[in-house]
Image: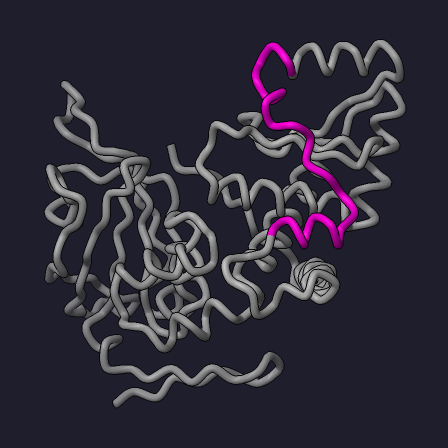
Amino acid sequence: MTKPDDSSLDPEDLRAVEARARRLLDRADAWNRFPVPIEDILSAAKVQVAPTSAFDADSILAYLKGRAADTGVRIKSAITKVFGLYDAGESLIHVDDTVVESKRTFLKLHETAHHDMPTHRKTFRFFQDCEKTLAPEIADQFEREANNFARFALFKGDTYAEYASDCAFEIKTPMKLAKKFGASIYASAREFARTNDRACVVYILEPPEFCQANGAKAIVRRIEPSNDYVARFGHPADKVITSDHFLWSVLPCGRRMTRPTAVSVIDKNGTCHDCVAEAFDTTYNVLILLYPVRALSARTIILPRGFKKKVADK
């Protein structure tokens, strides 16, 4: 099932969130250090990680029961499946140590966002001290803000985009940059597409599975297009990739990676474009990078924030 949008914010809200993240990176002196110095960021935010050994189902239930008996606390959950918790009363974050390290890093930054942004911290503290619950629309807004805070801190504003612009335009680039920034390949691939000045899109699929009714299929988890891709081709709305889909031949069945493969995509004006698609199997998801052939001959100029970015085609 395609995941709902988890990061869209109004421009004014996004600027405010990024400003908070920027100040935290300044306090932690984290801008020119790779991968992200998570411990120094936590220290600068004055928040601590609780012992991860306590993050199992039985311990969580015991912790919540004990806290509720004393103060009626309602601990805030980071995401639908509980991988992280923020306790505003104790300035503690709990992170599941069974998930991969790159995901733990993002979870720590996400929970730190709730602690570092005054509105979040005060709101969570208020609801922890009473029997009420946070309204769904407010909780969703806070989650989007925390995701953007974590994303800005992890990829250090425009730094990731600047590095990507100097690298080859291929799926191996977000894979390599994931290691440098301490991010998951999943998060790095999303960042590669969403910050790219060239037309490209990343499909994130669930592992292919066999369905008796329709044969093999791969559910689309997310689709992350660049702004230029959306302007030219629109936002893809695929929900599932089956054997009759134009991207099916790109899936790396029985291998980790697929070489660049020629495909065709029709733009908003009905014009057919020669494109290239290549894929990588992370074992958790299949990532497909798709881009027009002409994107390979485009030069991107990254200018300081506040200037308009330009793409000059050769």
Q: Quadrant of the N terminus?
A: top left
Residue 80 in the image: x percent, y percent? Answer: 56, 28
Query: Would you place residue 230 above or below residue 149 in this image?
Result: below
Residue 219 in the image: x percent, y percent? Answer: 29, 35
Q: How many marks?
A: 0
Instruction: From the viewer's perspective, tell me whether residue 33 is left or right of residue 94.
Output: left
Q: Residue at x 60, y 58 (%)?
A: 153
Instruction: From the viewer's perspective, tell me whether residue 208 is left or right of residue 221.
Output: left
Range of magenta residues: 38-59
Based on the picture, tell me whether residue 53 belongs to the magenta stretch.
Answer: yes
Query: Would you place residue 290 above or below residue 150 in this image?
Result: below
Q: Residue at x 20, y 32 (%)?
A: 217
Query: Would you place residue 303 above or below residue 254 in this image?
Result: below
Q: Nearer the viewer, residue 139 or 84?
A: 84
Q: Main SS type for the magenta part?
A: helix
Q: Nearer the viewer, residue 77 or 27?
A: 27
Residue 174 in the image: x percent, y percent? Answer: 35, 59
Q: Residue at x 60, y 79 (%)?
A: 305
Q: Residue at x 55, y 28 (%)?
A: 96
Q: Quadrant of the C terminus?
A: bottom left
Instruction: From the viewer's perspective, tell me whether residue 154 is left or right of residue 220.
Output: right
Based on the picture, tell me whether residue 44 belongs to the magenta stretch.
Answer: yes
Q: Nearer the viewer, residue 80 or 272?
A: 80
Residue 232 in the image: x percent, y percent? Answer: 33, 69
